[in-house]
Amino acid sequence: MTEKRQSIHGQWSSRWIFILAATGSAVGLGNVWKFPYITGENGGGAFVLVYLICIALVGLPIMVAEILIGRRGRQSPLNTMHALAQEAGRSPHWRWVGAMGIASGFLILSFYTVIAGWAVAYIFRAGSGAFQGATADEIDALFDGLLASPWALLGWHTLFMIMTVGVVARGVKSGLEQTVRIMMPALFLLLVLVVGFAMSTGAFERGVEFMFAPDFSKLTAESILIAMGHAFFTLSLGMGAIMIYGSYLPQNASIAGASITIALADTAVALLAGLAIFPIVFANGLQPGSGPGLVFQTLPLAFGQMPGGVVFGTLFFILLTFAAWSSSISIVEPVVAWLVETRGMTRSRACLVSGGVSWLLGIGTILSFNVWAEWKLAGKTFFDWMDYLTANIMLPLGGLFIALFAGWVMKRFDVQDELGLGESVWFKVWYAVTRYVTPVLVLVVFLHAVGIV
Ligand code: PFF
């Protein structure tokens, strides 16, 4: 057996902190902002079903693979894949999977901080009582007003970027525990509260039906690709974020158990967000497919009508900001770890570089909501492209290679040793799914989307 490596970047103090950190990475804007609006745009129930299947058969096995690769290699994803491939006597070119992950990190961070900026802006709007008694049209106008101002968006984007790299510069561990241990359950509870409100709107059943009654005629090849892409995005897979978190995991912690906990928590938050939002959509005659503004156009209506709405609304957007924060730090971490290892930079400098590049790129996303709104390539704005390219192409492609890496490149003995499940049926099921089912599913969805199968 080879000697176990140590990470130069540190280690989580316990398995529990790892679960908190990885859950913090997974639960974010993807659950509360993106899942509801893409469910709305893609027709509801059938889309949700495909998404859930992808979480189970693609996301979960790849999460296990990412964590075990990370812990085995104990370096940034790029260097880890290079080292493990060489150890197994395979091509060093596997490091390109890590390199693609670094590119994905820059691109995702660039728009993630823009959208997170909206959440920060909404803390102040909710706190000022702007939603109280407002009609759906007035709430819409407030949102449109924010998007119309590039300078306001730039300000919030800049603030959130500074918040993100500020934490990463000091090491992801500090501050993370509070955020995840207290804020995540609080966000969960507030979502339950809004679901309670949604039940009183008279349209709860329609909302539930929209989300859970599958109408397969609404399912297109494109929407299947989007559902799969979202499974990667929401679980933070395919770019090395979970891999780098895995590289800080203590040797004796169970990888499979942690993965199931993280995936369940993430899915629960997404479904709750949907159940909070869709009844409000139908009760107010709004459009489920209205796009990226959906959560900002619906939940303020609920806060504007419920007793204590100013407090709950403010708290909700604070918690959403924290959820986005604990995700955004995990997007930069693989990039920073790589810059530190390979370029010999200090953490602070690496943060400055990666944050700076993403900040610049983010200006494209900001402008795509106003000045460049009409500038479209194949019907997509700059933001649409960033989102599409990362979530639907780069992350699934990265995930596909990660599954192949754990299933075919690493030696079976090493994989088994790292997972610690012995020759149990759990190990056999996971190994078979990761070798055959997951890669084939990802490939078929890709080929289906381009019209080949
Ligand atoms: N999982 C995060 C969310 O759902 O908001 C987004 C994300 C984090 C994507 C980290 C990718 C990543 F590496």
Image (cartoon, grey):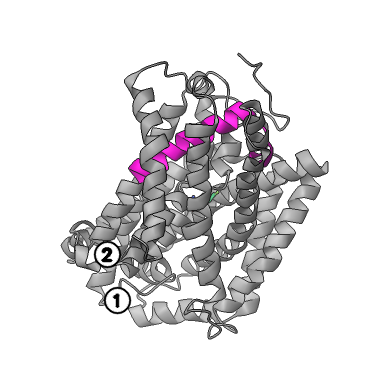
Whether 245 is drawn above or below 428: the answer is below
> CA–CA distance between discs 2 and 1?
22 Å
Whether 41 is drawn above or below 322: the answer is below
Label 1 sits on residue: 286
Tell me the quarter of the picture where residue 293 sits. bottom left
Label 2 sits on residue: 219
Amino acid type at circle 2 is Leu
Whether 222 is drawn above or below 176: the answer is below
> What main secondary structure does the magenta stretch of the protein show?
helix
Residue nearest the viewer, comparing 36 with 423:
423
Give the residue at x 34% y 28%.
Answer: 429
Over which residues does the magenta segment extend? 55-79
Relative placement, left or right, of 140 versus 85 is left
Relative placement, left or right, of 319 versus 42 is right
Which quadrant is the N terminus positioned in? top right
Residue nearest the viewer, comparing 277 with 440:
440
Q: In terms of secondary structure, where does tag 2 sit? A: loop
